Image (cartoon, rainbow, N blue to C red):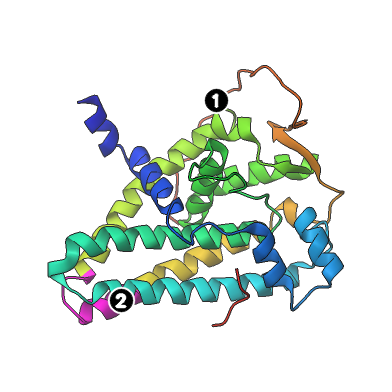
Amino acid sequence: MKQGKEVENPESRFFALLLAAAKLPGVRIHREAYLRSALARHCSEDDIRRAIEETPAAAGITVEVLDKVANDSIRYETAKVSALSAAAGIPGILALPATVPADTAQYVGHMLRIAQKLAYLYSWPDLFSDEGDDVDDATKGVLTLFFGVMFGTKSANVAVGKVAGMMAEQVAKKLPQKALTHGVVYPMVKKVASYLGIRMTTQSFATTVSKAIPLVGAAVSGGLTLATYLPMAKRLKKHLAGLPLTEPSHRVMDGEVVDGEVVEEHETFAAAHAGQHGADTPAPELEEPRS
């Protein structure tokens, strides 16, 4: 009985969808390959090398260049996800049980793809650096917050700003594991995940209705995807571009940020009890470089 309740929990539902989408082929973006390809037309080899070894901001790549590359990536991913959504709508009502779950998963997968690309351009660290299918809790948390920004939630904007501020202040290469998993940002992650679980269920229902009529459903489904995906991607781009991580910084360190404190990779530490601050209430507010 308890397990059934967990399945119905919006927060659990969203995390299950996020993790399932992260395992789909082609969803994970290789940071080094993407930055090298995306920046090749605009930057010198030395700048690209430093952007990969450190960050595009540390390499002195201007926000204007990054915005242009980001827009190219957004156009590419939007066209791709819209075409796939339209194709999934063609079979009509008889194929709904098969197409709707797949369509939802590939939609979330493309949200993950653009979130990674924008993060890497605007100087966030590698989100899937470890081998294997597992997604660590810090990455799951920051991706949840990125999705929250895409959906226009105020608490996600605040939380992403907090995380970026921690990393920029300490010029660290890794996500703040403690803050994202049981520290000051974690309550916001849970709040946003619950909100997204509800929103995505509503969006999935709208997509299901649009697929009920063959051919017409394809056009409506593709148009619905275009109308939602594009502004969400632009919203995340605008937010990430305005964070302190995009400002030129000193050479990044190999440690990770823990609630504002850098801990070297080889250093061990006792887990401190972080204060749990309540999250704000969410307010709903083609050619591309090779990846």
Majority secondary structure in the magenta region: helix
Instruction: Point out residue 256 in the picture as x, y percentages from the top left corner.
Output: 72, 36
Write the residue at 57% across / 49% down: 157
First reached walking from the N terminus: tag 1 or tag 2 = 2
Q: Residues within 10 Å of mark 2 (few under 14, many from 20)?
A: some
Towards the viewer: 278 or 147: 147
Residue 231 tag number: none
- Left or right of 243? Residue 93 is left
> Which kind of residue does numbered mark 1 sit on?
Gln
Instruction: Point out residue 65 in the picture as x, y percentages from the top left corner.
Output: 74, 72
- Left or right of 129? Residue 16 is left
Query: In the image, which is nearer the foreground, mark 1 or mark 2?
Result: 2
What residue is disc 2 on?
Answer: 87
Towards the viewer: 101 or 190: 101
Look at the numbered disc 2 and give the secondary structure of its residue.
Answer: helix
In the rendered structure, does residue 222 fall within the stretch colored magenta? Answer: yes
> Which kind of residue does numbered mark 2 sit on?
Ala
Does the image show residue 204?
A: yes
Estimate the spatial distance between the alpha carbons at disc 1 and disc 2, rounded to whole Å: 45 Å
Magenta highlight range: 210-223
Does the image show residue 279?
A: no
Instruction: Point out residue 34 in the picture as x, y percentages from the top left corner.
Output: 65, 65
Q: Residue furthest left?
A: 94
Kindly indicate the quadrant of the structure image that contains residue 120: bottom right
What residue is disc 1 on?
Answer: 276
Write the residue at 62% across / 34% down: 177
Look at the numbered disc 1 and give the secondary structure of its residue.
Answer: loop
Towards the viewer: 288 or 143: 288
Towards the viewer: 32 or 111: 32
